[in-house]
Image (cartoon, rainbow, N blue to C red):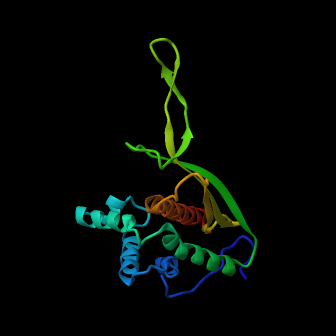
Amino acid sequence: AAPAGKPAKVVSTETWMDQEVKGCHFNDVRLAKRFRKQMADGIGESVPSACQDWANTKAAYRFFANADVSEDQIMAGHFQATRDRLAQAGRKILMLHDTCEFSFQREQDARIGLLGRPSCGRDKNGRLRHLTVRGILMHSSLTVTTAGLPLGLGGYLARATDPPPGNMVIWRGLSRLNDIQLGFALAAKLMGN
């Protein structure tokens, strides 16, 4: 095991992306290939930026909207890779918890949970006006070493009254994990570690 506070050195011919997606199990082999390509080409980017043209952007949105693709399938690979990194860490880890609100504006919002009703000013009679905010409340757990190296998402929970977070929310979450990992690598480089 590596000394306390230092990440374990892992030598592998697999890329980070290979490790992240190998635990994903889609019902169709073509979906797995498409997911791997989308992840490799654009993790950390918005879908349009990652896809670079309209045809690929439409294909990505079709993939996320596909009834045969679920966030459980998408996240299975990441959760497996996180478990593998935890097993290699061989020391104490920290679980950082965070609750996020994903708010959405939709014409029909009945399927999206209520986040709140903040006041947004007064009407002409001086009464408070309220805005109904709809969305998803999600609590997530990020696993990190005691040195601060992110190992992955330990899990996430949504309120029982909310629908599943959906594939686009999962994409955004994976993009943020990539941002955290890149930030850690940059900080370690600047600090000389």
The image quarter in which residue 96 lies: bottom right
**At which x and y percent is residue 55?**
23, 65
Given residues 28 and 48, the one toward you in this image is: 28
Quarter of the image with the C terminus in it: bottom right
Q: Residue at x 48, y 11 (%)?
A: 125
Lateral position of residue 2 relative to residue 69, left or right: right
Quarter of the image with the N terminus in it: bottom right
Lateral position of residue 131 relative to residue 4, left or right: left
Given residues 105 and 184, the one toward you in this image is: 105
Q: Residue at x 63, y 53 (%)?
A: 98
**At which x and y percent is residue 62?**
32, 66
Q: Residue at x 50, y 82 (%)?
A: 22
**In the orientation shown, which residue stands out farthest toward the front?**
110
Given residues 159 and 101, the one toward you in this image is: 159
Lateral position of residue 33 relative to residue 187, left or right: left
**At which x and y percent is residue 101?**
55, 47
Question: Vertically, is 183 above or below 18?
Answer: above
Question: Vertically, is 178 above or below 90?
Answer: above
Q: Residue at x 55, y 33 (%)?
A: 117
**In the orientation shown, which residue stands out farthest toward the top?**
125
**At which x and y percent is residue 172?**
46, 59
The total of numbered circles placed on residues is: 0
